Image (tube, helix red, strand yellow):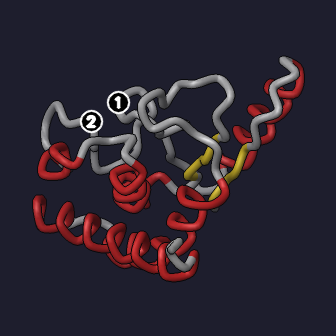
Amino acid sequence: MQDNPITSLKSAAYRIRRYALQMGAVQGQGYIGQALGMADILAVAYRHALNYRAADPKWEGRDRFLLSHGHYAIALYAALLEAGIVPEAELDSYGSDDSRLPMSGMATYTPGMEMSGGSLGQGLIIAVGMALGLRQKNNKAFVYNSM
């Protein structure tokens, strides 16, 4: 018997929230409210909408998910943990020196993070450029941007 898709998404969103709370407890801070609010969106994105390979986060055919508001990185990290892109063993390193999970999202550090966030809204321009570049390469991947 297959899992009910709604139940599966609710369970994924619950785990994303739990991961975010665990990471917030590591540093005693983080944008927890944002992570709790984004969990449902991220669960649908990573369990239903996005085409990706957890073992190969740089796979050319992957869909891209850009987090324009980089200070929400804790939410995306939790989703990347849920998706199996970032190992759960790294959860306790959140925000620590030399962590692949810095407090603000850094694409050069974190597998699955497509852009380093900063100014709110900059992700829209990056997403458009990324989508146009993919089209030029005849790559059928989708680009999603969360603002």
Q: Is residue 77 above or below residue 5?
A: above
Quarter-of-image position of residue 76: bottom left
The residue most toward the top is 137
Of 56 and 17, nearer the camera is 56
Q: Is residue 53 left or right of residue 96?
A: right
The residue labelled by disc 2 is 100
Q: Is residue 46 above or below residue 8?
A: above
Mark 1, Cα crowd under 10 Å, few <14 / some 14-19 / many 20+, is some
Q: Is residue 24 above or below residue 127?
A: below
The residue at the point 85 percent across, 30 percent down is: 132
Q: Which mark is residue 96?
A: none
**SS under mark 1:** loop
The residue labelled by disc 1 is 109
Q: Is residue 32 left or right of residue 7?
A: left
Between the C-alphas of marks 1 and 2, the distance is: 5 Å
User: x%, y% of residue 55?
Assistant: 42, 31
User: x%, y% of residue 58?
Assistant: 53, 25
What kind of residue is marked 2? Answer: Arg
What kind of residue is marked 1? Answer: Tyr
Q: Is residue 101 above or below residue 134?
A: below
Q: Are marks 1 and 2 in contact (CB under 8 Å)?
A: yes
Mark 2, Cα crowd under 10 Å, few <14 / some 14-19 / many 20+, is many
Of 108 and 5, nearer the camera is 5
Q: Is residue 40 left or right of residue 92?
A: right
Question: Can residue 62 be seen?
Answer: yes
User: In the rendered image, which quarter contains the C terminus?
Assistant: bottom right
Question: Can residue 71 be seen?
Answer: no
The residue at the point 27 percent across, 43 percent down is: 102
The residue at the point 81 percent across, 26 percent down is: 139
* Mark 1 or mark 2: whose residue is earlier in sequence: 2
The residue at the point 41 percent across, 26 percent down is: 108
